[in-house]
Image: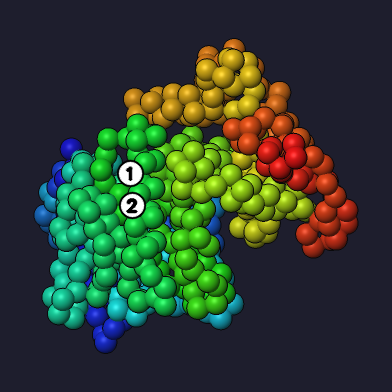
């Protein structure tokens, strides 16, 4: 097994991080001449990663000459390093990365980038850690904070300071990192971290997410206590959230209000991402499932837990329903949408509405077919169980599991959803709280009249 030791040495100037040295020691890594050594994600779904400077590979013999090439497998841009001779002994890879320099034209996108803000910096691992095929053994992370201001802290998804993970370097690449003058609220392996002090009560947000995590963890039958949330201040007009391995990052800005009430659904959405997903290779093939379940459960779990009222759930579902049916790109096939979704952000939203409405219908159908004894929950939990057992999960697993749990073959419906055929929401979906009827709305951008659906609380409709 390859043992990996990663040392991160950030350099602080004032309340900013100027650069960070990355040193990766690989015990038992062996490469022959011409074999790929590692690669860096220079760009991920249009979000710039770091371009390493001073890249140097050494081993027991000395410097390992490397050949560099670049490739663009959608939706990434990669730089690859090839060993030009056989390696001997422990291999060390060293380079320096710098935080992303934002331009005026940059807009909010997924939070992968290594970014500075007042007091420090934060990043997803993929933006500054190279991918090293085969580095799957233990990975030890060490922070060297000797060039940072006194009192600086380094944290990643797995904890504060030095940590060791069993899942190899790849798990660290799929994690979040933050360094500097950090504020935090922690409880055991649950942590919440931010840099810039906001004009709102961060404690309330942290408290809400901690409660949510505790309850979701029970619902998703998860034993792992590790979960960390990272906060970033955006210089943009809008902010969002991005989920990675057992963690997520959300953003705030000076223009949009931020409170538990305003953001509870996105906070729940990002957290749900910790659990249900299918293998999304090639990119876009199962996004409907991860975004659909995140949308569905981010409303239904808080509702079932009594954290929100049916009226609040309905208002959110109405927003999402209208956003989907008035989206001019809603007729695109899933892969067709995935192929353009980072150029046309409207297409990026398709999988959310489509996935949620399809799953809501499937849920109602399963309940009806099983006399209310089974639901989408059983399907999703069964798939989670298969995933934990190491099965490779694709769309077929979803369809087979629905059939197994309920006797229903939803292949035709699934194909229609995938192809962009309009979904007609059933009256009993979303736990039967609402009635639903057609309504007309202007399509976004074009203004032409299109059909959406209006939700009403059952009690209200019966009045
Ligand atoms: Zn999402």
460 and 363: which one is in front?
460
- Residue 296 in percent (x, y) is at 56, 41
Helix, strand or loop under label 2:
helix
- For the N terminus, the image quarter is top left
Left or right relative to 446: residue 29: left
85 and 323: which one is in front?
323
Q: Which residue is tagged 1? A: 214
Q: Residues within 10 Å of mark 1 (few under 14, many from 20)?
A: few
Picture quadrant of residue 203: bottom left
Helix, strand or loop under label 1:
helix
Which residue occupies the extreme right position in the image? Answer: 448
Left or right relative to 87: residue 383: right
Which residue is drawn at the image coordinates 53% and 62% (left, top)? 262
Left or right relative to 347: residue 188: left
- Find the distance from the CA under tag 2 to the CA under tag 1: 6 Å
Residue 372 appears in the rendering? yes
Vertical placement of residue 213 versus 223, above or below? below
55 and 392: which one is in front?
392
Left or right relative to 160: residue 248: right
Q: Are marks 2 and 1 in contact (CB under 8 Å)?
A: yes
Residue 391 appears in the rendering? no
Q: Which residue is tagged 2? A: 210
Vertical placement of residue 463 versus 70, above or below? above
- Residue 443 in percent (x, y) is at 81, 56
- Residue 13 in percent (x, y) is at 26, 85
Which residue is drawn at the image coordinates 63% and 32% (left, top)? 432
Vertical placement of residue 200 versus 265, above or below? below
């Amino acid at each position: 097994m390859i043992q990996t030791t990663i040392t991160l040495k950030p350099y602080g100037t004032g309340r900013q991080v100027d650069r960070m040295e990355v040193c990766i020691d690989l015990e038992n890594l062996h490469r022959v001449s011409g074999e790929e050594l590692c690669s860096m994600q220079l760009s991920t779904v249009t979000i710039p990663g770091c371009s390493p400077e001073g890249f140097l590979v050494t081993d027991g013999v000395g410097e390992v000459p490397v050949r560099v090439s670049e490739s663009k497998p959608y939706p990434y841009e990669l730089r690859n390093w090839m060993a030009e001779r056989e390696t001997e002994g422990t291999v060390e890879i060293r380079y320096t990365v710098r935080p992303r320099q934002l331009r005026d034209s940059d807009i909010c996108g997924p939070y992968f980038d290594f970014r500075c803000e007042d007091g420090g910096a934060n990043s997803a691992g993929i933006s500054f850690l190279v991918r090293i095929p085969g580095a799957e053994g233990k990975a030890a992370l060490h922070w060297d904070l000797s060039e940072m201001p006194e009192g600086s802290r380094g944290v990643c998804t797995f904890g504060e300071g030095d940590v060791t993970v069993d899942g190899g370097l790849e798990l660290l690449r799929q994690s979040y990192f933050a360094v500097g003058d950090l504020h935090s609220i922690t409880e055991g392996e649950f942590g919440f971290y931010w840099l810039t002090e906001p004009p709102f009560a961060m404690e309330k947000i942290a408290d809400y997410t901690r409660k949510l995590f505790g309850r979701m963890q029970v619902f998703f039958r998860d034993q792992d206590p590790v979960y960390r949330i990272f906060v970033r201040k955006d210089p943009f007009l809008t902010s969002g959230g991005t989920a990675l391995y057992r963690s997520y990052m959300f953003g705030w800005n000076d223009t949009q209000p931020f409170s538990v009430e305003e953001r509870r659904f996105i906070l729940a959405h990002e957290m749900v991402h910790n659990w249900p997903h299918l293998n999304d290779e090639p990119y876009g093939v199962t996004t409907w499932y991860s975004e659909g379940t995140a949308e569905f459960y981010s409303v239904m779990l808080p509702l079932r837990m009594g954290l929100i009222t049916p009226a609040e759930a309905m208002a959110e579902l109405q927003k999402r329903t209208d956003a989907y049916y008035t989206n001019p790109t809603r007729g695109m096939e899933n892969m067709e949408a995935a192929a353009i979704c980072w150029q046309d952000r409207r297409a990026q939203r398709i999988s959310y509405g489509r996935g949620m409405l399809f799953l809501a219908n499937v849920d109602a159908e399963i309940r009806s077919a099983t006399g209310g004894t089974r639901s989408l929950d059983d399907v999703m939990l069964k798939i989670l169980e298969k995933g934990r057992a190491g099965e490779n999960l694709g769309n077929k697993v979803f369809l087979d599991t629905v059939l197994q749990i309920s006797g229903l073959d939803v292949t035709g419906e699934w194909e229609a959803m995938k192809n962009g055929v309009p979904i007609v929401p059933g009256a009993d979906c979303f736990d039967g709280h609402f009635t639903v009827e057609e309504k007309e709305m202007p399509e976004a951008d074009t203004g032409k009249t299109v059909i959406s659906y209006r939700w009403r609380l059952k009690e209200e409709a019966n009045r």
